[in-house]
Amino acid sequence: MKKLINDPDDVVDEMLDGMTATYPDRLRRLPDTQVLVRDDGPVDEKVGIVTGGGSGHEPTHAGYVGDGMLDGAAAGDVFSSPTADEFEALIDACDAGDGVLAVIKNYEGDVMNFETAIELAEMEGVEVESVVVDDDVAVDDSLYTSGRRGVCGTILVHKAAGAKAAAGGDLAEVKRVAEKVVDNVGTMGTALTSCVTPEKGEPTFDLGDDEIELGIGIHGEPGTERTEAMSADAITEELTEAVLDDLDLDEGQEVLTIVNGMGATPQMELFVVNRRLQELLGERGLETYDAWVGDYMTSLDMAGASITVCAVDDELKELFDAPADTPALTTR
């Protein structure tokens, strides 16, 4: 293993300190926690938007803390959920009196610990609502979930909910638009290599030099099929067709797409994937309103990519276009 780390036990703590050192006017770390919040928060007369989960998916989660998106995020250890106490501290720190929306990726640890934290926060008088994101179309159940996994489509939930909150929407309105994204988004990914966690120091699963995994999860969970290596176009077709079949969109529907790198995939390759993705959408009679390409939700140093498609209407387009200023995503 060759990684730019010191002690594996300290890597998350040192990462968070490095983030606050990089963005001292944007991010603040709550004392004795692995929680980062807006330096200027909580923002008066605005619903707080929070999330969290295991580390190793950067820039998810804290990379999206800032104007127009999240108010705070809790970081667990690598691929491990934050504790309920951390989530409770996060919720409390992001409540300005107008309530808090928790955006939860559908993993059992995240769901269980967030639910406990919400109960504790509500006992203290904080109004909290939540949405669970389950956009991965690959599998109905996995090693870490009951139901579909929450993956890169979560970023669009952050964006829409954050924009609605920034515009003054109340908690019910913010939750409504978050659920609207969840209902209209699908994702599927592939792994060309395994990732290597700092604690283990070796690949988390075995994948032959001539093999790829389709439908992989962001922690290296098994996908739908292990197959021989394929061309970029063939992989793109497999992923895109699975997502579009799940969404079952009408001809003429506008969509936002994301080609997301898993951490070790060059942008050159991501753009090659996007080229074929856009061709496939055209063949289906779908219209691309916006296309994002880059690393949005990774799996440490895994080589691979995921494809996200979200059906949009005028309301969602306005929310996705709304200004945001975060370390990982800026829109004007």
Image (cartoon, rainbow, N blue to C red):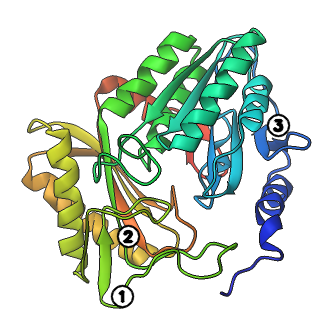
Q: Viewed as shown, does residue 248 lie left or right of 332?
A: left
Amino acid type at image mark 2: Leu
Describe residue 166's horizontal placement relative to residue 143 as left or right. right
At x 58%, y 43%, the residue is 109
Task: Give, as a three-letter code, the residue at label 1.
Answer: Gly
In the image, residue 67 above or below residue 203:
above
Residue 232: quarter of image: bottom left
Q: Nearer the viewer, mark 2 or mark 1?
A: 1
The residue at the point 69 percent across, 32 percent down is 71
Q: Residue furthest right?
A: 31
Q: Position of residue 75 (x, y in %)?
A: 70, 48
Residue 159 in the image: state x and y as whole percent: 51, 36
Verify CB contact (< 8 Å) between mark 1 and mark 3.
no
**x then y, percent, for residue 187:** 33, 50
Mark 3 and mark 2 residues within 8 Å of each other at the beta carbon? no
Q: Which mark is residue 17?
A: none
- Residue in the picture at 49% in, 73% down: 302
> Of label 3 and label 2, which has the lower sequence position?
3
Q: Is residue 242 visible?
A: yes
Q: CA distance from mark 2 to mark 1?
A: 22 Å
